[in-house]
Image (cartoon, rainbow, N blue to C red):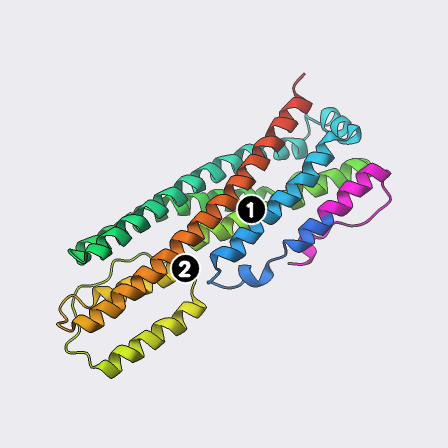
Amino acid sequence: MESRYHVRSISLPSRLHSCTVGIDEELNKLKISEALSTSSYKADTIRSGLFGLGELYHYVDDLLRLPLTQRALVQHQQEKWVGEVLDGSVRLLDICGTTRDLLSQMKERVRDLQSDLRRRGGKEISIGAYFSARKKVKKEILKGLEALKRMESKLGFSSILGLDQNQAVLARLVREICSVTISILKLLLSFLSAPASKPKSGGWSVVSKLMMQKVKVRCEEDEEKANEVESVDAALRNLWKQTSSKDVDVERVHIQMAQTRLEALEVGIECLEGGLECMFRHLIQTRVSLLNILTP
């Protein structure tokens, strides 16, 4: 992972060099190999990545304002690497917009379920509706992940041989930036796409007070390893199993656990919405700057 986001330091004009150093520093901050290698990544990790991308795109804006950059883009606008930049900017905007809608839908479902659990009535129907909605959302998530994978596979496909030193650096930079942006968005979509299979019906028999405490401890241990979406799923499945239980205390514990995790997920989604909105605005600015440069 380290070599993937590394930008070589070479002799460049001072203003271009200043931008490339800033971009290099932000890319290094965005190295998230640990998060990429695990199936559980929490909202605050991804939120940090999204705001880190915002900082990165501040330097991109500076880079696009440089006459040297503008000349390179105009002179080579018919070449494939410039086409990659334009195509990538609009595709990333589309995926960001879709992801923003998915986060909004997810938050709405979470709030609906919280309201239903507070009323205590018809919890089986409410939980079933939540998982059904998650399945529908997951279909859109998988489409987004596939689109990002296709973008990733095309990065660097066009040759930069024959470009001068400055132009080659610019071409590599935009690819590195696009690559790390794709990685962060993949993490965000993967966060939302935790398994959403509907729990099977059927309850426990009589659960003792000791067993109730063990369940609570196990849930807390699982929560340390899982992200917010997975934690909610686990809590709801445990609550679903209480459908035939006559132990009111046990049910109360599971409802409280589900409510606590739903609240954490709602907070996490709102944090991600803020980070994604910041990212979305920067992508729009980048797209506008590119079109202004390349449109006569």
Q: Where's residue 8, x and y in %?
A: 78, 50
Residue 157, located in which quarter of the rendered image?
Answer: top right
- The residue lying toward the viewer, choosing from 144 and 157, is 144
* Residue drawn at point x = 68 percent, y = 16 percent: 296
Q: Where's residue 216, x and y in %?
A: 32, 74
Marks 2,1: beta carbons within 8 A: no
Q: Is residue 22 magenta?
A: yes
- The residue lying toward the viewer, choosing from 248 and 85, is 248
Residue 86 shows up from this direction? no
* Residue drawn at point x = 31 percent, y = 46 percent: 136
Residue type, mark 2 in image: Glu
The local secondary structure at tag 1 comes to helix
Q: Is residue 16 left or right of residue 284?
A: right
Q: Pointer 2: what residue?
A: 228
**Where 78 falls versus 134 (above or below)?**
above
Q: Where's residue 126, x and y in %?
A: 21, 53
Q: Is residue 187 magenta?
A: no
Q: Which residues are magenta?
A: 1-23
**Where 221 falls versus 294 (above or below)?**
below
Distance from the alpha carbon under mark 2 to that under mark 1: 22 Å
The local secondary structure at tag 2 comes to helix
Q: Which of the marked residues, 2 or 1, is nearer the chain's N terminus?
A: 1
Q: Residues within 10 Å of mark 1 (few under 14, many from 20)?
A: many
Q: Residue furthest bottom?
A: 210
Q: Is residue 38 left or right of residue 33?
A: left
Residue 219, located in which quarter of the rendered image?
Answer: bottom left
Q: Pointer 1: what residue?
A: 182
* Residue drawn at point x = 44 percent, y = 69 percent: 224
Which image quadrant: the N terminus?
A: bottom right
Residue 31, located in which quarter of the rendered image?
Answer: bottom right
Residue type, mark 1 in image: Ile
**In this rendering, the label closer to the viewer, 2 or 1:** 2
